[in-house]
């Protein structure tokens, strides 16, 4: 596997997810609890990032 | 009832600070300021999130949503989330670099790696200037909470009492006290946000929506993407260079503890949708706080029993006090180790108490005076704090970078940011810190090409060679 995969998975992918939540979700999408769909997608990045970092921690080289 | 619960929790926090020093009565300066190598993953996690989520997160985030809409949420949430990733990768290296030289502060590391007193002074002075406004910001938030708790009392007395409590944490056990109080703060903070946010969501349909002219509606303004992306990147990497964050990184028992804590750290951010829902609940249900930043507490007052409101207010106050105590523990050694070197370990701790007292007094008086200057300086925090990053990366990997390149980079980076900021130069929405950082890196690279260091050794090479 590629040597730099932990950086891609634990740093670049979370950044891409954050940007995707802002760029790909339409502005006129419905709101839930007063919060836009784009922001719900943004908030969903947090648990996904935790999982990605956990994979880097378990499968990547030691700290 | 609210006041009684609040005071009981404050007394409990003082008891926890006293308890935290058991078995550690006589600590050296490094252990006092950084609890060097004493914390496992769990305690490190609490200290880490305790340092991240200040009174601004609990009051400022919902206040910003209530007052100005959700355009700032992207960069605010994005940079904190990405900072977890940056700390996951860089944190272990900061820990190792500190262990290599026995550092307690950022200037300690730069001085010892490049054997330069001038670089130590430059990093110490800029760090102190950048940290000063944080005290004012925390006292401003504390003034808001304590004013709501006892409106008839003089604000100066209330914030003075809070300052004394913070001073007590610092004097009792240094960073150990901050870490143990952070556990209480984080438990109460999460409990409060779950309680208030959960009740607001449960009550969403039960109470008919009230049209209130005074309550601003959520603005659906799209974020400025250039500003948002540049701010996320700059502040996420800058987060790793915050002086008090180095202190908590040095407190970890080993690099694995840092990584484990950062894996869990993003989960803590699930509080943000609840905070945002609380702000939109206030807008939809006619709750109009005296100031936007009071909106979370205003909703708590409406939805909770007075005793539970006291707990929420204590959580908010502790979120300010924990950060304040950490900043005190960062500023103390910056003065007593780096500005005035040569003090003994006991002397550093003794003189740090005076420095901390002076810092708290200055911050308190600045907050009482409106804190205009400090609020302006606070805007510069991340612009300035990130300027040590190129030097740190160079120390890790590039043995040919001379000290003149690092000093030149920091001076030019800070100068460019200051000139652009004071001149209000339009930069197309780009975060000014990114421009300063680019100038810093250009100077660092240019000077290195012209006058490379010949006898240098990188931290990574030193680690491989066994120190």
Image: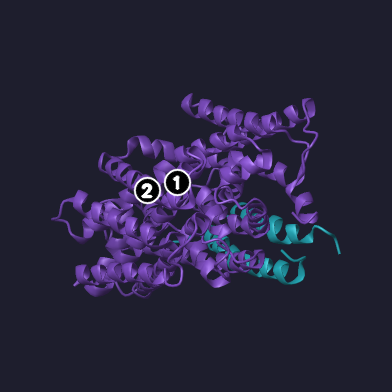
Chain colours: A cyan, B purple
Q: Is residue B327 visible?
A: no
Q: Nearer the viewer, residue B13 or B208?
A: B13
Q: Secondary structure at mark 2?
A: helix
Residue B380 percent across, percent down from the top left: 48, 37
Category of crowding for the residue at label 1, using alpha-carbon neighbours closer than 10 angstroms: few (below 14), some (14–19), many (at least 20): many
Residue B55 percent across, percent down from the top left: 38, 56
In the drawing, does residue B188 fall left or right of residue B95? left
> What residue is shown with label 2?
B356
Determine the residue positioned at 47% across, 61% down: B27
Query: Which quadrant holds residue B388?
Result: top right
Q: Nearer the viewer, residue B448 or B98?
A: B98
Residue found at the far left of this picture: B152
**Marker disc for residue B331:** 1
Residue B448 percent across, percent down from the top left: 76, 31
Callout 1–callout 2 Cβ contact below 8 Å: yes
Determine the residue positioned at 70% across, 45% down: B393
In the drawing, does residue B290 fall left or right of residue B327? left
Q: Is residue B391 visible?
A: yes
Residue B114 percent across, percent down from the top left: 68, 38
Query: Which quadrant holds residue B188?
Result: bottom left
In the rendered image, which quarter contains the N terminus of chain B?
A: bottom left
Residue found at the far right of this picture: A1
B319 is higher (above) or lower (below) than B357: below
Q: Are marks 1 and 2 on the same chain?
A: yes
Chain of the residue under label 1? B
B269 is higher (above) or lower (below) than B101: below
């Amino acid at each position: 596997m590629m040597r730099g995969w932990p950086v891609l998975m634990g740093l670049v992918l979370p950044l891409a997810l954050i940007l995707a939540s802002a760029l790909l979700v339409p502005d006129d999408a419905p709101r839930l609890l007063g919060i836009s769909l784009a922001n719900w997608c943004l908030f969903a990045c947090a648990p996904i990032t935790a999982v990605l970092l956990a994979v880097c921690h378990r499968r990547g080289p030691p700290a | 009832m609210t006041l009684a619960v609040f005071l009981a929790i404050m007394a409990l926090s003082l008891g926890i600070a006293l308890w935290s020093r058991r078995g550690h009565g006589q600590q050296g300066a490094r252990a006092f300021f950084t609890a060097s190598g004493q914390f496992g993953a769990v305690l490190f996690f609490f200290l880490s999130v305790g340092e991240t989520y200040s009174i601004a997160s609990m009051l400022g985030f919902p206040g910003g949503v209530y007052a100005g809409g959700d355009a700032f949420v992207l960069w605010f949430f994005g940079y904190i989330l990405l900072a977890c990733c940056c700390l996951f990768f860089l944190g272990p290296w900061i820990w190792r670099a500190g262990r290599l030289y026995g550092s307690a502060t950022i200037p300690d590391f730069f001085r010892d790696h490049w054997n330069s007193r001038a670089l130590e002074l430059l990093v110490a002075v800029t760090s102190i200037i950048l940290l000063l406004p944080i005290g004012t910001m925390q006292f401003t938030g504390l003034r808001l909470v304590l004013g709501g708790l006892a409106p008839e009392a003089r604000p100066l007395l209330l914030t003075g009492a809070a300052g004394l409590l913070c001073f007590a944490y610092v004097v009792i056990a240094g960073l150990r006290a901050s870490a143990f109080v952070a556990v209480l703060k984080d438990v109460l903070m999460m409990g409060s946000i779950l309680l208030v946010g959960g009740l607001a969501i449960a009550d969403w349909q039960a109470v008919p929506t009230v049209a209130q002219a005074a309550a601003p509606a959520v603005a659906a303004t799209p974020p400025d993407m250039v500003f948002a992306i540049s701010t996320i990147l700059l502040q996420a990497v800058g987060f790793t260079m915050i002086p008090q964050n180095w202190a908590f990184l040095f407190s970890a028992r080993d690099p694995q503890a840092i990584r484990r804590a950062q894996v869990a750290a993003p989960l803590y951010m699930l509080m943000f949708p609840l905070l945002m829902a609380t702000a939109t609940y206030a807008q939809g249900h006619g709750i109009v706080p005296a100031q936007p930043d009071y909106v979370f507490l205003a909703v708590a007052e409406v939805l909770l029993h007075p005793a539970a409101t006291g707990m929420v207010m204590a959580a908010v106050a502790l979120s300010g006090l924990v950060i304040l105590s950490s900043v005190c523990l960062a500023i103390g050694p910056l003065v007593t180790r780096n500005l005035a070197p040569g003090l003994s370990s006991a002397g550093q701790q003794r003189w740090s108490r005076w420095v901390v007292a002076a810092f708290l007094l200055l911050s308190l008086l600045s907050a009482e005076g409106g804190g205009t200057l400090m609020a302006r300086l606070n805007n510069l925090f991340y612009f300035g704090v990130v300027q040590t990053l190129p030097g740190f990366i160079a120390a890790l990997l590039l043995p040919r970078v001379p000290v003149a390149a690092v000093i030149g980079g920091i001076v030019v980076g800070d100068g460019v940011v200051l000139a652009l900021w004071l001149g209000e130069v339009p930069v197309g929405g780009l975060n000014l810190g990114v421009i300063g950082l680019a100038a810093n890196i250009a100077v660092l690279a240019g000077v290195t090409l012209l006058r490379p260091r010949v006898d240098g050794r990188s931290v990574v090479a030193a680690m491989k060679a066994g120190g």
